[in-house]
Image (spheres, helix red, strand yellow):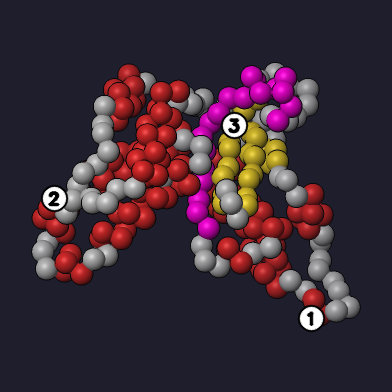
Amino acid sequence: MTFLKKWIAALQDLSFSETLKNLEIYLNLIKWLHQYIFYYAQQTELLQNRKTVLLCKDSITEQTRKNYLKKTSISNVSEFEKEIFEFIQKIFDDLNFLHHQNLNQCLYIDLNASKWHEFDVMIYHMQNDHDDSLYHIVKKNQQKIEFIFFLSKLLTNAEIQYWFTELEIACLVWTIKKIYHIINEFLADTVIWTNYFMIIQIIKQMMLISSFMNKLNLCLIRILQYCF
């Protein structure tokens, strides 16, 4: 924990990057802490895009990448980019220090998938949940949350076209792929919170039967075969 606090203190002393090399170093540093940051992928998207655009310029083929990173300065920095940087820096002022998972305690997974927030997942324990599962949104339960880590992901071009139900199921599949090894080790139950009741009905459906074959959603069929 002392090492982590020193790492965060070093990050807090950084100013907005003036060169491509410094920007890449900064993004790599905060990526190491991504599990501590809710909406990490969304928070860093603008800076990641700036790095990608600079790396895609033709001039990178004329020099080695190392020299190119050193010599390329970041010009025309928008106020919004600066605000994003300051916002990310402020996250480290009140960082969510995480708890280690307890295999004998119920594991909670909260899914949030939308075309605005994209994929955001919160994995956590709840204090005093021995008798029944506790929902973290209930105000009296919010102080009982023990965060384990966070996951986040930007949508691909294909995922942007998904319906909301498809998007939530895709988020569920992606999450399970990421943390299957953790879920599999737990001796206690795993509770997954979702905003779409339809998903529960789809999971309970043992077979997909319809008299209108042209109306079957083939995307959902593939997802169900893969995950369940």
Q: Which mark is residue 222?
A: none
Q: Is there any visible trace of residue 142 in the rendered image?
A: yes
Q: Residue at x 14, y 57 (%)?
A: 68
Considering only vertical position in the picture, is 178 above or below 61?
A: above
Q: Is residue 111 above or below residue 144?
A: below
Q: Secondary structure at mark 1?
A: helix
Nearer to the camera, 82 or 29? 82
Name the residue rendered at 32%, 54% in the picture: 50
Which residue is under mark 3? 124
- In front here: 105 or 199? 199
Q: Are marks 1 and 3 in contact (CB under 8 Å)?
A: no
The residue at the point 45 percent across, 26 percent down is 95
- Viewer-proximal residue among 54 and 27: 54
Q: Position of residue 86 (x, y in %)?
A: 37, 34
Q: Residue at x 51, y 62 (%)?
A: 156
- 204 horizontally vs 143: left or right: right
Q: Which span of residues is magenta-colored?
A: 137-155
Say which of 127 and 79 sits in front.
Answer: 79
The quadrant in which the C terminus is found is bottom right
Q: Is residue 105 above or below residue 159?
A: above
Q: Position of residue 173 (x, y in %)?
A: 61, 55
Q: Nearer the viewer, mark 1 or mark 3?
A: 1
Numbered tag placed on residue 214 in the rendering:
1
Residue 125 lies in quadrant = top right
In the image, residue 141 lies in the stretch drawn in magenta: yes
Please report contact status of discs 2 and 3: CB closer than 8 Å, yes or no.
no
Residue 70's disc number = 2
x and y, in percent, of residue 172 in the image: 63, 51
SS class, disc 2: helix
The amino acid type of the residue labelled 2 equals: Lys
Going by the numbered disc 3, the residue's amino acid type is: Tyr
